[in-house]
């Protein structure tokens, strides 16, 4: 586990997103190859246009919300099919350094770890997010607090949700009701 953490610190979070897109492309190519082996033309995925959706939870939620940003920054005709029709997330992190003590981010920055010097933030990636977006968020989430996304009334700030440019966006908060024994 420690080697995984160290390896992730050496990479900029945009590299994580790049790997996600590349892995999706590889998986799609393999699926298309497999579907060509089927005799029926209607099952050959390589000849079909498909709707593509992205889902993510927590840090994966931020990667899902940043997916269109990556595709727009790295234009490639092979990747156009992966432009999502819609993105849905659960309890997404608004940035990759959220929840990490400020002193730790500062020390990592001194040593020029890309994780700390090039964080992924919805403030930036949300400007490219022009597809329908649904965010599901628990009101009791202790890691990604709901106020990270929507600030309380009369607050000077609006919250990360308003960094998403899409006009077709919704955020849904839900409460966990514990049963009494």
Image: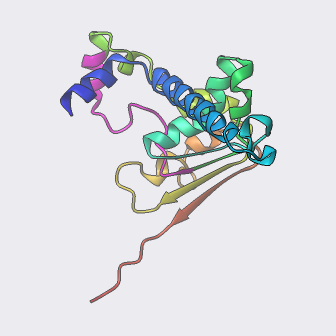
Query: Where on the picture, by quarter, is residue 119?
Result: top left
Q: Nearer the viewer, residue 162 or 88?
A: 88
Q: Which residue is drawn at 49% across and 25% down?
A: 19
Q: Which residue is drawn at 32% across and 10% down?
A: 112
Q: Which of 157 and 150 is in front in this view?
A: 150
Considering only vertical position in the picture, is 109 above or below 40? above
Is 105 included in the stretch rendered in magenta? yes
Residue found farthest to the left? 2
Picture coordinates of residue 103, whole percent (x, y):
24, 25
Q: Which of 154 and 17 is in front in this view?
A: 17
Is residue 53 shown left or right of residue 138?
Answer: right
Q: In which quarter of the image is the N terminus?
A: top left
Query: Where on the picture, by quarter, is residue 74?
Result: top right
Considering only vertical position in the picture, is 33 above or below 93? above
Considering only vertical position in the picture, is 45 above or below 175? above
Picture coordinates of residue 21, whole percent (x, y):
57, 28
Picture coordinates of residue 43, whole percent (x, y):
74, 47
Picture coordinates of residue 122, whole percent (x, y):
56, 33
Q: In which quarter of the image is the C terminus?
A: bottom left
Q: Which residue is drawn at 35% across and 49% down?
A: 143
Residue found farthest to the front? 39
Q: Nearer the viewer, residue 177 or 37?
A: 37
Is residue 127 shown left or right of residue 107?
Answer: right
Task: Tell me if I can see residue 103 in this picture.
Answer: no
Is 111 included in the stretch rendered in magenta? no
Q: Which residue is drawn at 56% across and 34% down?
A: 27
Magenta span covers which residues? 89-108
């Amino acid at each position: 586990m420690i080697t995984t953490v160290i390896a992730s610190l050496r990479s900029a979070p945009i590299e994580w997103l790049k790997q996600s897109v590349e892995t999706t492309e590889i998986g799609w190519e393999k699926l298309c190859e497999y579907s060509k082996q089927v005799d029926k033309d209607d099952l050959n995925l390589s000849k079909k246009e498909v709707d593509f959706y992205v889902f993510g939870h927590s840090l994966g939620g931020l990667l899902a919300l940043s997916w269109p940003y990556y595709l727009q920054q790295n234009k490639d005709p092979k990747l156009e099919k992966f432009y999502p029709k819609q993105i849905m997330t659960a309890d997404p992190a608004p940035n990759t350094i959220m929840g990490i003590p400020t002193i730790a981010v500062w020390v990592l920055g001194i040593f020029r770890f890309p994780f700390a010097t090039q964080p992924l933030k919805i403030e930036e990636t949300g400007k490219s997010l022009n597809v329908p977006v649904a965010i599901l968020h628990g009101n009791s989430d202790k890691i990604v607090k709901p106020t990270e996304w929507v600030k309380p009334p009369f607050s000077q700030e609006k919250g990360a949700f308003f960094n998403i440019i899409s006009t077709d966006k919704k955020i849904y908060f839900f409460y966990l009701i514990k049963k009494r024994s």
